[in-house]
Amino acid sequence: MRDSDQAHALLTGSFVRSAFVSVLATGTDFVVASLLSRALLASSLATFVGCAAGGLVAFTVNRGWAFRSRGNSGPEVVRFLGVWATSALLNSSGVGWLTHAGVTFIYAWALVRVLVYSAWNYPLLRWFVFRRVPGFAR
């Protein structure tokens, strides 16, 4: 297999697995945020708590399955927390801003999630949090 074919297979595989994990984590996030929002908690705070629940699912399943990371998880946890905290801030701010502008919570939540995942979460998970160690096959 050529290097470019191998890189494409790796990227496609990790992207598909990570996208599936994202759906699982986002489902967790959505249920928690929705319940808290319906309980009349501020939309930005409900979103943040939902992000925390989804983040726990995202780290655990991405590490073990999507990116097949092994070894010491300490440095990955630190990197993940930085990415997660920024993602939570982007999501919370975006949802808060859009709902303040009159967009319903569900539409604001979905739009912001897609944008933040595509432009922030996946690229940083792939190339920063769970980066490959040269010579270590996954």
Image: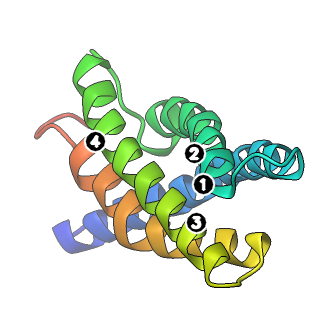
Residue corresponding to mark 4:
129
- Residue most toward the bottom? 102
Residue corresponding to mark 2:
48
- Residues under labels 4 and 1: Cα distance? 26 Å
Quick check: marks 4 and 1 in contact, CB under 8 Å?
no
Name the kind of residue labelled 4 in the image: Val
Residue 26 percent across, percent down from the top left: 67, 53
Q: Earlier in the sequence, mark 4 or mark 2?
A: 2
Mark in front: 3 vs 2: 3
Residue 72 percent across, percent down from the top left: 27, 15
Residue 58 percent across, percent down from the top left: 55, 40
- Residues under labels 3 and 2: Cα distance? 10 Å
The residue at the point 21 percent across, 42 percent down is 132
Q: Earlier in the sequence, mark 3 or mark 2?
A: 2
Name the kind of residue labelled 2 in the image: Phe
Residue 27 percent across, percent down from the top left: 75, 51
Q: Quadrant of residue 80?
A: top left
Residue corresponding to mark 3:
96
- Residues under labels 3 and 4: Cα distance? 27 Å
- Count residues near mark 3 (Cα–Cα under 10 Å), then give few for <14, some for 14-19, many for 20+: many
The residue at the point 63 percent across, 51 percent down is 47
Q: Earlier in the sequence, mark 4 or mark 1?
A: 1
- Count residues near mark 2 (Cα–Cα under 10 Å), then give few for <14, some for 14-19, many for 20+: many
- Count residues near mark 4 (Cα–Cα under 10 Å), then give few for <14, some for 14-19, many for 20+: many
Mark in front: 4 vs 1: 1
Taking depth in this image into account, of 100 and 84 the one nearest to the observer is: 100
